[in-house]
Image (cartoon, coloured by chain):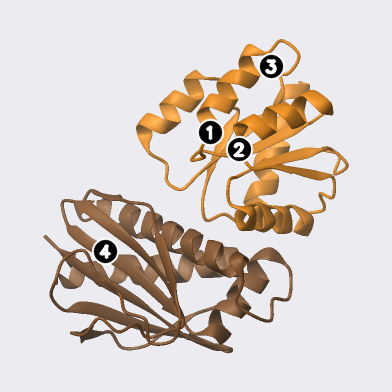
Chain colours: A brown, B orange
């Protein structure tokens, strides 16, 4: 896993959530994850192909995603619903778009597939390619989420 | 000076994304907003009421944003309606195709309410000149 992949996804995540959900996510220390267990209650996953191949997953705690989507649509959402699922797909799509644009500056040209959304406690994430994925943990005041990137050149 | 009482049509297949755009529009003072879930529904809305600005997503089933743009430009009654295309990324080929088809401007997600407002002001003023 090339460390060059960290910043584009980190910056993409902060940029998208700051712009669309008016929250300021704080990033923790990135680490490698070997298992496929998700770190949240709902995840968006998107396949990536091109000069690097793999996938990007975002896993949100329920508290974090309820705050994020409530801010995005201007309604106070109190429990998981279809708006949350749609929004997770859209957020995954947007973060992938910004990250891929940032990666172009380093010479990586990557296309994205259509995101899928998985929900439930202790669900698993199947990355397109095997191997350890890089986790960037984030928190907002209401809860935590992680960006999970598995990308190989 | 753009009037905030203009009627905007937001076209996106994701209901949540329509709510997101509606929320941003309300933040900058637009209240008269109608929604359509794809190009076909958008054309139906355009035929039944006077729409001042179309804000349409690029990727949609049934009729894409580009196909909707072409249909609007080919219709003598709707042809001059300002059209703002929303895209997930500014792919050169997509931008060229949209410009060729007569798009007034495009906006790349994610975007702020302020940037959206600036785009609406710019395209409505250019039409009114």
| Residue beneath disc 4 | A55
| Residue beneath disc 1 | B62
User: Where does residue A55 sit, x and y in percent of width and height?
Assistant: 26, 64
**Hey, which quadrant is residue B9 in on the image?**
top right
Q: Is residue A36 left or right of residue A129?
A: right
Residue B38, compared with residue B102, is above or below; it is below
Ranked by sequence position, the earlier of labels 1 and 3 is 1
Q: Mark 1 belongs to which subunit?
A: B
Closer to us: B13 or B112: B13
Cα distance, mark 2 to mark 4? Answer: 28 Å
| Residue beneath disc 3 | B79
Q: In which quarter of the image is the C terminus of chain A?
A: bottom left
Q: Is residue A32 left or right of residue A121?
A: left
| Residue beneath disc 2 | B38
User: Where does residue B82 sit, x and y in percent of width and height?
Assistant: 69, 28
Cα distance, mark 1 to mark 3? Answer: 21 Å
Q: Mark 4 belongs to which subunit?
A: A
> Looking at the image, how many numbered discs can be counted on the residues?
4
The answer to whether marks 2 and 4 sit on the same chain is: no
């Amino acid at each position: 896993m090339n460390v060059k992949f960290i910043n584009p996804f980190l910056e993409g995540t902060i940029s998208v959530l700051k712009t669309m959900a008016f929250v300021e996510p704080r990033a923790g220390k990135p680490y490698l994850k070997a298992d496929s267990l998700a770190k949240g209650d709902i995840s968006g996953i998107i396949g990536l192909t091109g000069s690097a191949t793999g996938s990007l997953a975002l896993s949100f705690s329920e508290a974090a995603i309820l705050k994020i989507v409530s801010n995005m649509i201007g309604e106070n959402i109190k429990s998981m619903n279809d708006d949350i699922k749609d929004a997770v797909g859209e957020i995954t799509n947007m973060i992938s778009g910004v990250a891929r644009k940032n990666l172009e500056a380093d010479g990586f040209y990557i296309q994205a597939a259509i995101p899928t959304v998985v929900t439930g406690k202790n669900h698993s994430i199947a990355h397109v390619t095997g191997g350890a994925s890089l986790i960037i943990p984030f928190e907002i005041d209401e809860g935590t989420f992680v960006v999970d990137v598995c990308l190989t050149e | 000076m753009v009037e905030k009482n203009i009627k905007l049509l937001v076209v996106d297949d994701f209901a949540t994304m329509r709510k997101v755009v509606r929320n941003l529009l309300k933040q900058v003072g637009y209240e008269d907003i109608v929604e359509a879930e794809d190009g076909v529904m958008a054309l139906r809305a355009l035929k039944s009421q006077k729409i001042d600005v179309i804000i349409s997503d690029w990727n949609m089933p049934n009729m894409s944003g580009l196909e909707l743009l072409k249909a609007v430009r080919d219709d003598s009654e709707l042809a001059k309606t300002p059209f703002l295309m929303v895209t997930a990324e500014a792919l050169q080929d997509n931008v060229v195709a949209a410009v060729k088809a007569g798009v007034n401007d495009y906006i790349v997600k994610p975007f702020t309410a302020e940037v959206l407002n600036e785009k609406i002001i710019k395209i409505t003023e250019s039409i009114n000149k």
